[in-house]
Image (tube, coloured by chain):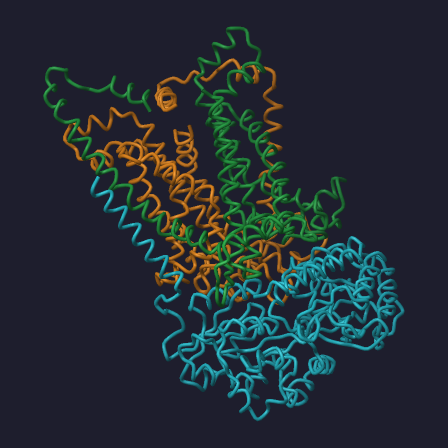
Chain colours: A green, B cyan, C orange
């Protein structure tokens, strides 16, 4: 913040130091106090809302995770038993492994395609803006709606995408892509890419455009090649944006649920069940709310850790 | 600073109070309805007739029934969460397989006396009565019946040189008929299943095991029987249909939506489905179809007794009227409305009067209902109906991946652990 | 970092943008215009294809919508699939759209007001612990709300807000707040301090200074917050499915899932795509109308 403040002060339209000297001397204290109070007052409604509808349920969730807590009927305290069980739960382990696999594939795909698109449409003429606009359209589509749409597109026999592939000689319209775990996951990744890559493109574009042009110019004048400029000048300056994009993308993938719930139903043979899906099943199919809460708590810890590590790695090397 | 601390303390206190209230479950009761209405929850698969039933009641009663249709896939979860929060309906029409679970958790009203006072109590579907009983008390009355049978396309049978009036009566005959129908070409398939649908697989696959003399659970429901020889035979039967190429590839991932559509397209020879499908086929009026019992390995037959039971909830506001409605729902007037909408009635004493005469094929369904069976377990949902549960996974892996022995072994282990972990 | 943002902003507001950087210029030279257009256009086709499928499928006559292989375009335009949404399927899509609108607008209004206030507080009116509180709020990003849905249900029940559109709007507001806060705080942080200080010296109160002077400059952030919140609420599926039971109060995505479960076992894909279209088209239209603000807002500082 210091840079900002400094810059701001420089531009203060004070008439002159002499004229306001008295006021300045007295104001800082009282004004600072009032500002603090105002800060508390203005942030309280939002914080109260988050406390009531998020932190309270969160604490309840942690409390429930220490119990054998069926949806209906008596619950009893079992301490850390749920957490111990979770470590030996093969179904949960399978779900976690699948989620990690999905994240490891999706993240680079989205990132590379997003960056490629950003570089492609990084131009300041009407055509580029038009394509930016077009590529972003799917972002406003809901995940559930998009999943229903792609589910239809890739249905065997009646799906237009399979039919198109057939016409182009790329595949057969009778192939049931959802019957193989790899192909089912590919269709889901296709859907997610379609829906999300526009956002990544836009975020990266923003990052690119916030890089001062003189920096780039200087590098070029110093004789850096385009690739070198990108690698040594643009990429490091893009780091904050990269951190943001990566955190969003990784967290989104680790929390995947809707797309698999709608498109694969976890199949074939439970091969596309994600961690959140397994938690949903535990809580709402098996009605083991206590155990489901324990799994939620574990997922939460992992997510916070992964995001924190990402931010740290990308920030510290920035300095 | 003082303000901030006070505020923080206030927020904290409020949270603690709320937390305590939420955990105590003693919150204000906003459930049910005023005395003028009875709230009724039903599954969306019932929406074709449930409003007609409600309208029939509303015509001659002062207390009105208000129907809420809940998505079938989320019914148990929604009803469970609502009941846990004390905000459920007065009356619920519940898939009978879930009755033991809901009865065991105490969210349903004990209506043993009401049930015993019915003059036709012994004429109600036996499977329904068994499922509504928990610890010798009755928690629901039978409402609608469903029976699983084999649908076959008579035109395709004729074209394939099969006798349309002599449906296959054992595994071998189905396999051979399926091959002949597949041989007609032009995208025709012999037999389709919904391989990723728990409700379908328990409804359509277990009868083969029962008809062969086996079972899927022990009589007391405490032991899973997924690794028995009868299950192996039935899985091998499906596996053969698949490896012969007579089962379409969609069957693996079908969540229950492709199977009826495929039969309706006229390109599917046989498929196991329920009575509800008769109505669909008749409306469509393009397929010359036959209905046959689901056979065992060497003949015999069995059916899954499905459908709904109707229960008064513990938190019902208007218990008296709710009980009256539940009683009325098993009466001749309501059951006739159901029969007219192609729903199998639950009254064996009425079935030949109000249902069988409507269509010659109804006879097969009526017989199947009378002899139908249903697995009894408080964890039925997790074992069978969960589309990611051990039953579906075992079938899916055995039929489409082929390792039957291993699929059974793992299925048995997973199922037994679900039963053992039940509260 | 803020310095950089501020500088970039100032530059962006400058009269002439010197955007012909060497890199861009080089790419422009090495990639002929035609090739660029060809690549971009093919990609555009890819991006729009699913939406074309949705529209064309929903406009087919019911018989044609079910044929295999599918027709490439509707041979006979028909609104039957849309008519079926009116009630043939037992689902009143018009009512669902009304519910979605009500819940989404309510949550959007609440989110914008709350996150503007708090965003300003966190950006400009620091108080002891404000940074910690802000980052604690951000941390809630990482926690899936699916994890707390069951306690949330019990809580709403105790507040008498279960099975209600108000309760759903409150939950949506809560889950959109962290992101709104993040956007608004950064929006305010990007506004030159001089503006506000000048207003304060002119005798404006803190709130007045915020509303009169700083908010207009941070308006793109407000619009972005509003649009993102609206879209998120309009499209949300999981919480709506669990927290609302009465079919009359269902939002669009939940009604879609009822539609997709099929009336009697089979899905009517034509009707489903009509339902998907009804859900998607308003979002696309809003985006079309407000994309300048939306993208402009997203580009104008919140993302550093």
Q: Position of residue B334 (x, y in %)?
A: 55, 84
Q: Position of residue A87 (x, y in %)?
A: 60, 48
Residue B218's place in the image compared with A88, above or below, is below
Residue A137's place in the image compared with B234, above or below, is above
* The C terminus of chain B - image quarter: bottom right
Residue C13's place in the image compared with A292, above or below, is above
- Residue reaching furthest to the bottom: B119
Residue A305's place in the image compared with B334, above or below, is above
What is the quadrant of residue B295 in the picture? bottom right
* The N terminus of chain B - image quarter: top left
Q: Position of residue C32 (x, y in %)?
A: 61, 19
Say which of B48 and C77 sits in front: B48
- Residue reaching furthest to the top: A222
Q: Position of residue A131 (x, y in %)?
A: 53, 31
Residue, x 57% and y 60% (percent of image)? Answer: A285
Number of numbered discs on residues? 0
Q: Is residue B374 left or right of residue C79?
A: right
Say which of C241 and A205 sits in front: C241
What is the quadrant of residue B272 in the picture? bottom right
């Amino acid at each position: 913040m210091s840079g900002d403040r400094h810059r701001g002060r420089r531009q203060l339209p004070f008439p002159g130091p002499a004229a306001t000297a008295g006021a300045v001397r007295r104001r800082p204290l009282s004004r600072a106090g009032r500002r603090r109070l105002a800060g508390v007052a203005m942030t309280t409604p939002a914080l109260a809302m988050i406390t009531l509808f998020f932190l309270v349920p969160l604490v309840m969730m942690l409390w429930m995770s220490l119990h054998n807590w069926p949806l209906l009927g008596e619950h009893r305290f079992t301490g850390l038993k749920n957490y111990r069980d979770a470590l030996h739960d093969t179904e949960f382990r399978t779900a976690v492994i699948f989620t990690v696999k999905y994240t490891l594939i999706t993240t680079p795909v989205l990132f590379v395609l997003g960056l490629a698109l950003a570089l492609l449409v990084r131009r300041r003429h009407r055509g580029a803006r038009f394509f930016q606009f077009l590529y972003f359209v799917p972002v406003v589509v809901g995940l559930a709606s998009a999943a229903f749409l792609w589910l239809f597109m890739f249905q065997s026999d009646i799906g237009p995408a399979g039919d198109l592939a057939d016409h182009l000689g790329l595949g057969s319209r009778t192939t049931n892509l959802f019957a193989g775990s790899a192909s089912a996951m590919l269709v889901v990744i296709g859907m997610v890419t379609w829906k999300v890559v526009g956002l990544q493109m836009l975020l990266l574009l923003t990052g690119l455009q916030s890089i001062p042009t003189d920096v780039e110019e200087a590098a070029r004048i110093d004789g850096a090649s385009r690739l070198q400029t990108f690698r040594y000048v643009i990429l490091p300056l893009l780091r904050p944006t990269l951190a943001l994009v990566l955190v969003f993308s990784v967290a989104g993938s680790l929390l995947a649920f809707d797309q698999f719930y709608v498109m694969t139903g976890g199949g074939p043979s439970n091969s596309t069940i994600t961690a959140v899906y397994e938690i949903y099943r535990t809580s709402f199919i098996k009605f083991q709310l206590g155990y489901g809460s324990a799994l939620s708590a574990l997922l939460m810890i992992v997510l916070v850790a992964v995001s924190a590590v990402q931010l740290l790695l990308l920030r510290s090397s920035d300095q | 600073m003082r303000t901030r601390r006070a505020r923080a303390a206030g927020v904290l206190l409020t949270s603690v109070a709320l937390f305590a209230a939420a955990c105590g479950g003693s919150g204000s009761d906003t459930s049910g309805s005023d005395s003028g209405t009875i709230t009724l929850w039903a599954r969306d698969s019932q929406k074709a007739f449930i409003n007609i039933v409600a309208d029939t009641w509303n015509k001659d009663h002062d207390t009105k029934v208000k129907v809420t249709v809940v998505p079938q896939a989320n019914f148990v979860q929604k009803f469970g969460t609502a009941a846990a929060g004390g905000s459920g309906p007065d009356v619920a029409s519940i898939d009978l397989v879930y009755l033991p679970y809901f009865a065991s958790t105490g969210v349903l009203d004990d209506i043993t006396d009401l049930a015993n006072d019915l003059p036709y109590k012994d004429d109600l579907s036996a499977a329904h009565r068994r499922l509504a009983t928990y610890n010798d008390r009755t928690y629901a009355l039978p409402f609608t019946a469903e029976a699983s049978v084999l649908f076959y396309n008579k035109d395709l049978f004729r074209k394939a040189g099969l006798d349309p009036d002599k449906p296959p009566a054992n595994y071998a005959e189905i396999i051979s008929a399926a091959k002949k129908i597949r041989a007609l070409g032009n995208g025709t398939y012999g037999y389709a299943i919904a391989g990723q649908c728990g409700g379908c697989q328990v409804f359509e696959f277990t009868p083969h095991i029962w008809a062969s003399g086996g079972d899927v659970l022990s009589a007391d429901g405490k032991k899973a029987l997924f690794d028995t020889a009868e299950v192996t035979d039935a899985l091998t039967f499906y596996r053969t249909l698949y490896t012969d190429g007579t089962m379409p590839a969609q069957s693996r991932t079908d969540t229950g939506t492709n199977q009826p559509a495929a039969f309706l397209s006229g390109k599917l020879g046989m498929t196991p489905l329920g009575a509800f499908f008769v109505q669909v086929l008749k409306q469509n009026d393009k397929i010359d179809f036959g209905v046959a019992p689901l056979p065992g390995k060497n003949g015999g037959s069995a059916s899954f007794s499905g459908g709904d039971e109707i229960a008064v909830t513990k938190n019902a506001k208007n218990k008296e009227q709710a009980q009256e409605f539940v009683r009325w729902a098993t009466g001749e007037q309501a059951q006739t409305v159901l029969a007219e909408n192609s729903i199998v009635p639950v009254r064996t004493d009425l079935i030949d009067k109000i249902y069988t005469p409507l269509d010659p094929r109804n006879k097969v369904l009526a017989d199947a209902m009378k002899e139908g069976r249903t697995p009894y377990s408080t964890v039925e949902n997790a074992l069978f109906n969960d589309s990611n549960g051990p039953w579906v996974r075992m079938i899916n892996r055995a039929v489409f991946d082929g390792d039957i022995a291993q699929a059974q072994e793992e299925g048995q282990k997973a199922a037994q652990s679900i039963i053992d972990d039940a509260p | 970092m803020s310095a950089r943002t501020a500088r970039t902003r100032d530059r962006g507001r400058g009269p002439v943008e010197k955007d012909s950087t060497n890199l861009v210029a080089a790419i422009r030279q090495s990639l002929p215009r035609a090739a660029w257009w060809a690549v971009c256009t093919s990609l555009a086709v890819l991006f729009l294809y699913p939406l074309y499928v949705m529209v064309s499928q929903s406009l087919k006559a019911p018989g044609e919508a079910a044929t295999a292989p599918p027709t490439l375009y509707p041979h006979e335009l028909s609104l039957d699939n849309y008519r079926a949404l009116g009630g043939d399927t037992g689902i009143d899509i018009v009512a669902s759209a009304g519910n979605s609108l009500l819940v989404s607008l309510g949550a959007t209004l609440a989110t914008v007001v709350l996150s503007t206030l708090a965003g300003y507080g966190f950006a400009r009116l620091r108080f002891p612990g404000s940074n910690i509180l802000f980052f604690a709020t951000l941390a809630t990003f990482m926690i899936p709300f699916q994890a707390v849905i069951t306690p949330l249900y019990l809580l709403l029940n105790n507040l008498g807000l279960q099975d209600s559109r108000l309760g759903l709007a409150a939950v949506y507001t809560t889950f959109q707040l962290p992101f709104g806060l993040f956007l608004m705080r950064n929006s305010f942080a990007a506004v030159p301090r001089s503006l506000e200080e000048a207003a304060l010296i002119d005798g404006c109160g803190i709130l007045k200074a915020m509303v009169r002077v700083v908010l207009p400059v941070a308006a793109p952030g407000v619009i972005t917050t509003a649009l993102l919140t609206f879209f998120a609420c309009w499209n949300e599926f999981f919480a709506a499915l669990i927290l609302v039971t009465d079919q009359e109060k269902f939002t669009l995505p939940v009604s879609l899932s009822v539609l997709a479960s099929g009336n009697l076992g089979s899905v009517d894909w034509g009707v489903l795509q009509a339902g998907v279209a009804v859900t998607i088209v308003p979002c696309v239209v809003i985006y079309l109308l407000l994309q300048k603000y939306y993208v402009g807002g997203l580009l104008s500082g919140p993302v550093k």
